[in-house]
Image (tube, rainbow, N blue to C red):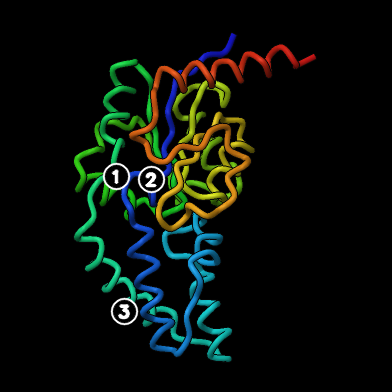
Amino acid sequence: MSYCRALIFDFDGLILDTETPLFESWKAVYREAGFEISLDYWASILGTSADPQEGYEILEQHLGHPIDRNAVHERRMKHEMELLRGETVLPGVTNLLRDGRQAGLSMAIASSSDRKWVTGHIDALGLRSYFETIVCADDVARTKPAPDLYRLAVERLGVSPGQAIAFEDSAHGVRAAVCAGLYCVAVPNRITRELDFREADRTVDSLEACDLEDLLCAAADKAQDAHRRTP
């Protein structure tokens, strides 16, 4: 009989709101180029990278010619990092990590961002010690919505997908977790809250709203039901 033994967290937009500074920095770039982009469209491309290539493609499509992507990246990142200085760990994160540790659960991060980005922020927030492993874009051939990050995370933790709960803030992330076979909790943020999260097993307003014992029971029930249905 399967039971939950691990919690796996996305990083951007779930542990730290890097997504609002990302959006605001790109908005400034687009505004200089003479156009605006809707929040709904921007949210739909999140979850695949800390610096989505679509951002550059949108600019090139509007201008009608290729751009110096490195120059745009450097200028935009300077603005993004200035905005990030005002951000801190999102509500409910620390309490859930503490509850997970007290419950004896293994914990990991599965992020489409690169390792330097994730570990730099995790270290600055003082959260590194909570995680047995951090799986990043550097570790897999395909990032979210492909399931590779979650498959590698559960493998490293030594658990089956049915023994883990994933926490995600993007539709791409939810799809990756569900395709990998994990119970998935969607936690929309101010950038992604209008997305369609119907693939998630549960959607909550914030990690503050998560009752770990209730989630463990729900995940176990789903795993047991899947076990019963297996021929």
Q: Amino acid at mark 1?
A: Leu
Q: Quadrant location of the C terminus? A: top right
Give the answer, above or below, for where 59 lies relative to 226. below
Q: Helix, strand or loop at disc 1?
A: loop
| Label 2 – label 3 distance at C-alpha | 25 Å
Q: Nearer the viewer, residue 227 or 188?
A: 188
Give the answer, above or below, for where 63 lies relative to 59. below
Mark 2 / mark 3, whichever is N-terminal? 2
At x 42% / y 59%, what residue is drawn?
Answer: 50
Give the answer, above or below, for where 86 lies relative to 178. below
- As drawn, the label of residue 90 is 1
Q: Helix, strand or loop at disc 2?
A: loop
Residue 158 placement (x, y as % from top left) = 48, 22
Mark 2, other Cα within 10 Å: few <14 / some 14–19 / many ≥20: many
Mark 1, other Cα within 10 Å: few <14 / some 14–19 / many ≥20: some
At x 44% / y 85%, what residue is drawn?
Answer: 68
Q: Which residue occupies the extreme right position in the image?
A: 231
Give the answer, above or below, for where 29 lies relative to 148. below
Q: Amino acid at mark 2?
A: Leu
User: Where is mark 2, residue-wise?
Assistant: 14
Contact flag, marks 1 and 2 (Cβ < 8 Å): yes
Residue 51 placement (x, y as % from top left) = 43, 65
Q: Amino acid at mark 3?
A: Arg
- As drawn, the label of residue 75 is 3
